[in-house]
Image: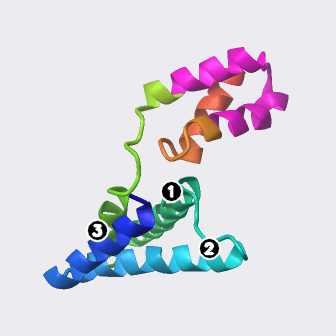
Amino acid sequence: MSLQKQVMDKMKEAMKAKDKVALQALRSVKSAFLLAKTESGAQEELTEEQESKIIQKQVKQRKDSAAIFIKQNREDLAAPELAEIAVLEQFLPEALSEEKVEEVVVAVIKRLDASGMKDMGKVMGVVSKELAGQADGATISGLVKKNLI
């Protein structure tokens, strides 16, 4: 079942349960899906990878917002953001541990025979594709830098 269908089903459940936080998060994802469909022009359906990236982007936006609110001692504003993150993360594949991500990074560096920071972009591209949805860019970037030195 596509992520769009899953989001719609969860949205119906949230409406019935009168779960305002979940409903708000799911509506924003639905809106992002519709926006992506119209941007891509004639393409009828989004691919699973595109859907996953949209949800990842929504989660990242909420994490960034929550971090800012926490830094400004606004727990009242951070709590809904964190609750929405929990709702959205159920649609993403399980995140890999940092050790697993590092294993993939080291393997890709060896496979590409990369050495030094000049090859960082090449390594980042391959690792990001292999781990799509399973690790965030900041984690990957940090591990690539660490292992390329």
Residue count near mark 3 (Cα–Cα under 10 Å), binned few <14, some 14–19, many ≥20: some
**In this image, 47 relative to 29: left or right?**
right
Query: In the image, residue 7 lies at what x, y percent?
Result: 36, 69
Q: Residue at x 63, y 40 (%)?
A: 129
The answer, for residue 76, to whether it is visible in the render is no
Q: What type of secondary structure mainly makes up the magenta span?
A: helix
Q: Are marks 3 and 2 in contact (CB under 8 Å)?
A: no
| 99, above or below 43, in the image | above
- Mark 1 secondary-structure assignment: helix
- Mark 2 secondary-structure assignment: helix
Residue count near mark 2 (Cα–Cα under 10 Å), binned few <14, some 14–19, many ≥20: some
Q: How many marks?
A: 3
Quadrant holding the N terminus: bottom left
Q: Of the residues shown, which amino acid type is indicated by label 2?
A: Ala
How many angstroms separate mark 1 from mark 3 (CA)? Answer: 19 Å
How many angstroms separate mark 3 from mark 2 (CA)? Answer: 24 Å
Q: Of the residues shown, which amino acid type is indicated by label 3?
A: Ala
Quadrant holding the C terminus: top right
For the record, the magenta segment spans 102-127
**Circle 1 or circle 3, nearest the eye:** 1
**The quadrant where residue 94 appears:** top left
Q: Residue at x 70, y 14 (%)?
A: 110
Going from N to C along the chain, the mark reached first, 1 or 3, is: 1
Please give the label number shown on residue 36.
Answer: 2
Q: Residue at x 76, y 20 (%)?
A: 112
**In this image, 111 relative to 97: left or right?**
right
Going from N to C along the chain, the mark reached first, 3 or 2, is: 2
Query: In the image, residue 91 lies at what x, y percent?
Result: 37, 57
